[in-house]
Image (cartoon, grey):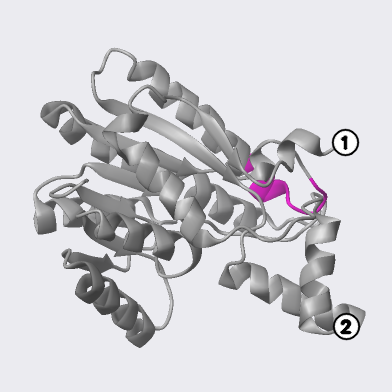
Amino acid sequence: MLKGKTALVTGSTRGIGEAAARALAAEGCNVMMSGFGDPDEIERKRASIEADTGASVRYHNADLADADQVDDLAHAVEAAFGSFDILVNNAVIRYFHTVETFKRDDWQHALAVNLNAPFFLIQDALPGMRRRGWGRIVNMSSVMGLGARSGRADYITTKTGLLGLTRAVAAELRGEQNITCNALCPGSVLTPNTEIKIGELARNEGIDFEDAKREYLLRRGQSTGYIEPARVAKLIVFLCQDSSLDINGAAIPIDKGRAATWLE
């Protein structure tokens, strides 16, 4: 159990982040949610997690592209709960451009949200973790941090960068007794963002949604179905428990074998 710990989960208003917020709250964590969306829907989700788990759940609407707002988010966690024990860097911005057509403002935006914000939040979280002698950092990379496909330069670059950041932080934590930093590398997870891309594929190809779901996976080399957000969340919870203490600096695929078998 993680009762009494405090977790910040960025990008937690939907998808993997929402599942992680719920799973950590169910383990007894206080949770700070962060992300964008319809305010009424976000409040409904926050209240639902709180009511279902009995945990204290708050929400902050920081724009992670702004470094000052990143720091404000970290300060809000400490002001609300007095500690900052678990950090899940999950928020992400995605663009779909070729290298030659990539707008530089979009590139800078992706770097700010996907890579700078996790680094800044780690900077904010580590001093307290060291004072308390306990901490868990989980960076959400991707199967595309381990490989590449065309038209995804920002995503591939930042997700690969998160793996380097994970190793760099873990190297600095080797002398600590109970603080770890690890990364997860999911394959295709059935999130709202994925469903948007499936819908676009269905319209472009003139096929129904179920056929588009199968075609979307086939084009990504993941032939055995989508990964459920709740299963990713369970792995995040495991990395926060004492039983995972010996895992530090790891990049863990959760991709149905996709990264290991891409040549097939």
Is residue 79 within the magenta segment?
no
Whole-percent x, y for residue 176 in the image: 25, 18
Secondary structure of the residue carrying tag 2 is loop
Asked if residue 170 lies left or right of residue 125, the reply is: right
Total numbered labels placed on residues in the image: 2
Q: Amino acid at mark 1?
A: Leu
Mark carried by residue 207: 2
Of residue 101 and residue 37, the one placed in the foreground of this image is 37
* Quarter that holds the C terminus: top right
Is residue 153 within the magenta segment?
yes
Whole-percent x, y for residue 197 in the image: 72, 71
Q: Residue at x 28, y 27 (%)?
A: 179
Circle 1 residues within 10 Å: few <14, some 14–19, many ≥20: few
Q: Amino acid at mark 2?
A: Ile
Q: CA distance from mark 1 to mark 2?
A: 28 Å
Circle 2 residues within 10 Å: few <14, some 14–19, many ≥20: some
Asked if residue 179 lies left or right of residue 64, the reply is: left
Q: Residue at x 47, y 60 (%)?
A: 230
Whole-percent x, y for residue 206 in the image: 90, 84
Q: Residue at x 11, y 54 (%)?
A: 81
Mark carried by residue 107: none
The quarter of the displayed image where residue 261 is located: top right
In the rendered image, the vertical position of residue 112 relative to residue 192, given as above or below: above
Location of mark 1 (residue): 263
Q: Is residue 120 visible?
A: no
